[in-house]
Amino acid sequence: MKFIKNNTRIQEQDDAALIARYKISGDLGALGQLYNKYMHLVFGVCLNYLKDEEQSKDAVMQIFEELVVKLKIHEVQNFKSWLHVLSRNYCLMAIRKNSKHTTVSMDETFVENTEFVHLDIDDTKEEQLTVMERCIEKLPEEQRISVQLFYLEEKCYKEVADLTGYDMLKVKSYIQNGKRNLKICIEKNSGE
């Protein structure tokens, strides 16, 4: 078990060194080396959310382009976790954007006798996002602010503490409790 912990620490140190090199010099080679280590995980997250291989491959490239900008701005303690959140948020936004611009081909709309066929367009993902937004608004203020900054704006614990003035331990507690309360609310309100 100690070997795994040491290996994780070494990996985090390697990641931190590559991040520092990128931030200081703007060396895209360092960023590429770092991203390459986790690209398969990013693809997995994208495939899980987008359910389309080609769209997921495109998303992996778009996420790298976001990374070029966002990594210079954000203080990242655990790159792997931060990248997972960045990837998930990218996919959720892509799903939301695509659900607003659903197109239907003429073949799907009409049958041979040219009678109009009612299409039952799957709005499940949009409904889930709407439920999530409503549930976030129902959280107590400290939890809502902390969850929004941490998950949606991708701030680290320290940044959340600095922006809100909350104690670091309180921030961690607000995020943990907010995440739990959000999950309970979403489960309770799904399918309404």
Image: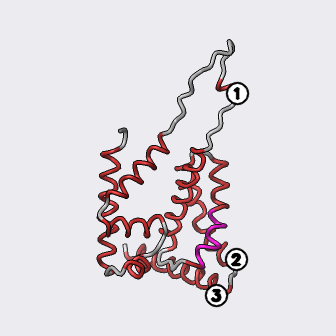
The residue labelled by disc 3 is 24
Residue 129 placement (x, y as % from top left): 46, 50
| Residue designated by label 2 | 28
Residue at position x 52%, y 59% in the image: 89
Percent coordinates x, y for residue 136 in the rendering: 37, 58
Instruction: Please state which of residues 4 and 21 is positioned toward the viewer in this rendering.
Output: 21
- Judging by the rendered image, the residue that carries numbered circle 1 is 106
> Gap between marks 3 and 2, in whole Å?
11 Å
Region rendered in magenta = 63-72
Q: Is residue 103 left or right of residue 157?
A: right
Mark 2 belongs to which amino acid?
Answer: Leu
What residue sits 32% from the left and 57% below the top? Answer: 138
What residue is shown at x 53% (from left), y 55% (from top)?
Answer: 45
Marked residue nearer the N-terminal end (1 or 3): 3
Task: Specify whether 170 is left or right of 102.
Answer: left
Magenta highlight on residue 66: yes
